[in-house]
Image: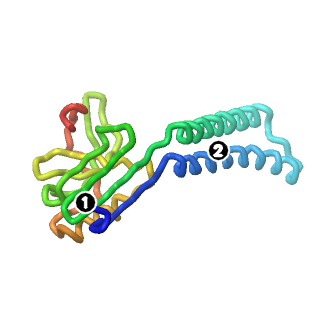
């Protein structure tokens, strides 16, 4: 299977944790930037603003460092593979977001926004099968749906990708989507 891969994307949680570490450090840099601003401009911001600013960015950096730590302590690998026959996504610890489908069964890629009794939901991106079943392609690991579509379109030129969000989708429970 390795020899006939058209597209392969692999990301492990350890590598992904560097993103959260950089974001946490950026929060700390914003705090340092406030002090640098006060020193060089010789202006003092209000105590209320300073407190909210420092506590907010400190809290955000702690959350981001915790997420990075969690990624390091729970190793796993996200993988997307496209061969001439199959489209496979292996999402760590989530059978709901993992799938293995035949390229010939894919009708189109689409962005979809589901509506339920509570209103508009979050937009999702994924593939619609000829049977009508929708497989979400989650972007948490930095993968590119455009590159996946291009690889599949090279195999099956009939697979389209509408960039507009499909807002006509109705509510589906998680059981219906699997």
Q: Quadrant of residue 62?
A: top right
Which of pointers 1 and 2 indicates the residue nearer the eye? Answer: 2
> Is 161 drawn above or below residue 71 in the view shown?
below
Q: Residue at x 65, y 39 (%)?
A: 61
Q: Residue at x 36, y 61 (%)?
A: 8
* Mark 1, other Cα within 10 Å: few <14 / some 14–19 / many ≥20: few
**Mark 1 → mark 2, Cα distance in angstroms:** 35 Å
Q: Quadrant of residue 98?
A: top left
**Residue 104: horizontal and vertical position, in percent?**
13, 60
Q: Residue at x 71, y 37 (%)?
A: 53
Q: Residue at x 45, y 43 (%)?
A: 76
19 on left or right of 142: right
**Residue 67: horizontal and vertical position, in percent?**
56, 38
24 on left or right of 119: right
32 or 144: nearer the viewer: 144
* Mark 2, other Cα within 10 Å: few <14 / some 14–19 / many ≥20: many
**Residue 33: horizontal and vertical position, in percent?**
76, 49
130 or 54: nearer the viewer: 130
**Residue 96: horizontal and vertical position, in percent?**
29, 38
Residue denoted by label 1: 162
Which residue, as the protein is rendered here, is positioned at the far top?
117
* Image quarter of the C terminus: top left
In the image, which disc is placed on residue 178?
A: none
Residue denoted by label 2: 24
31 or 104: nearer the viewer: 104
* Image quarter of the N terminus: bottom left
| Mark toward the start of the polypeptide (1 vs 2) | 2
Q: Label 1's element?
A: strand
Which residue, as the protein is rendered here, is positioned at the far left?
131
2 on left or right of 157: right
Q: Label 2's element?
A: helix
């Amino acid at each position: 299977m390795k020899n006939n891969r058209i597209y392969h994307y692999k990301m492990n949680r350890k590598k992904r944790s560097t993103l959260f570490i950089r974001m946490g450090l950026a929060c700390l840099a914003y705090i340092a930037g406030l002090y640098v601003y006060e020193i060089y401009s010789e202006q003092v911001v209000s105590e209320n603003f300073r407190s909210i600013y420092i506590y907010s960015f400190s809290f955000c950096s702690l959350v981001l460092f915790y997420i990075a730590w969690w990624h390091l302590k729970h190793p796993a690998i996200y993988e997307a593979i496209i061969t001439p026959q199959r489209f496979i996504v292996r999402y760590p610890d989530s059978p709901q977001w993992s799938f293995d489908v035949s390229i010939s069964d894919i009708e189109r890629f689409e962005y979809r926004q589901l509506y339920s009794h509570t209103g508009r939901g979050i937009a999702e991106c994924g593939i619609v099968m000829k049977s009508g079943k929708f497989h979400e392609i989650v972007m948490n690991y930095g993968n590119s749906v455009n590159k996946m579509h291009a690889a599949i379109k090279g195999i099956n030129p009939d697979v389209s990708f509408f960039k507009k969000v499909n807002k006509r989708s109705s509510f589906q429970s998680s059981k219906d989507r699997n």
